[in-house]
Each structure stands twice: as structure tokens, then as C-alpha cells.
Amino acid sequence: MSESDAAKPCVLIVDDEKNIRAAVQLALAPEGMHVIAAHDAPAALRALREHVVDVVILDIRLGDVDGLTLFRRIQADAPIPVVFISGHASLTQAAQAVRIGAFDFIEKPFSAEKLATVVQRCL
């Protein structure tokens, strides 16, 4: 990370879909945020060890592990605001995510403006 990136809020996007990771990057970079991406739980945990992350955007359904399980692991290590995203989650899963401490839940597809607004509120 460059010095200029170090001064920016850091957002970690964890999603198994490459196009979603790219969309988050495109939505948040113009807002002055440094975005790092992870495609699965091991990559996300590695990124959290290597970077100071201010907000995590986490897909509720990852290919290798349930997003709720990863959320609990993240919160056990450090209480970082987490915003869940999903295009397939049920209302029950969304309610559970918020009940266990997620900052917010956004349904896919989402607008860049909505995502940026929610992340700004986290910060």
C-alpha cells in the first residue's frame, strides 16, 4: 500500500464473484477509499492480518464458507464494521446478520451510491 493509500479508509470486499469485487472497487475508489479484495475466507483472513481494515463488505454466501461463519471469525479477532451483501439471501438470513452485529445488509444488485452511503456511515 502506498503512503497515499494509507491515508484513505480501507475497505475489504469479500465475494466469490469477480464482477462484484470490481463493482465495489469502482463504487468506492472515487469516494476516496482504498479497496482490497478477497475471493474466499482464507484470502479475507490473510488480508485482515496484512492491512488495517476500516470496513468489511461480506457476501453472505461464499463458495467455501458461510459468510455468517466468517463474520463471527472476523468479530472474534477485531470488531470491524461489516456490511453484508447478497443476491440470494433470505429475509431470515438478513435478519440474522443484523441480529448478530452486522452494520447493515444490502441486496444485490446494489447502486454505487447506496453502497458508498452505507460505507460512509460505517466510517
Image: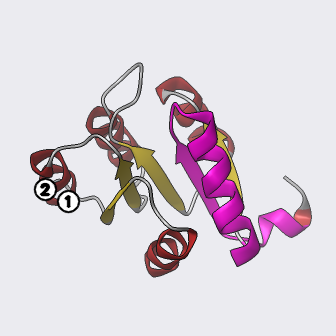
Q: State whether residue 102 is above or below residue 44.
A: below
In the drawing, does residue 97 fall left or right of residue 110?
left
Task: Find the distance from the CA under tag 2 to the CA under tag 1.
Answer: 5 Å
Q: Range of the magenta residues?
A: 4-32
Q: Is residue 50 visible?
A: yes
In this view of the protein, which residue sits in the foreground, 48 or 31? 31
Q: State whether residue 17 is above or below residue 54.
A: above
In the drawing, does residue 94 fall left or right of residue 22?
left
Q: Which residue is mark 2?
A: 95
Tell me the quarter of the picture where residue 70 sits. Answer: top left
* Classed neighbour count for the residue bearing mark 1: other residues with Cα under 10 Å, few (<14), some (14–19), many (≥20): some
Image mark count:
2
Q: Which residue is mark 1?
A: 98
- Amino acid residing under circle 1: Val
Tell me where residue 87 appears, x and y as whole percent. 34, 45
Tell me where residue 84 appears, x and y as whole percent. 36, 53
On whether residue 7 falls in the magenta region, the answer is yes
Q: Are marks 2 and 1 in contact (CB under 8 Å)?
A: yes
User: Please, which colouring scheme is shown?
Assistant: secondary structure
Identify the residue at horizontal 67%, vertical 47% (top origin).
22
Residue occupying the far top of the picture = 64
- Amino acid residing under circle 2: Ala
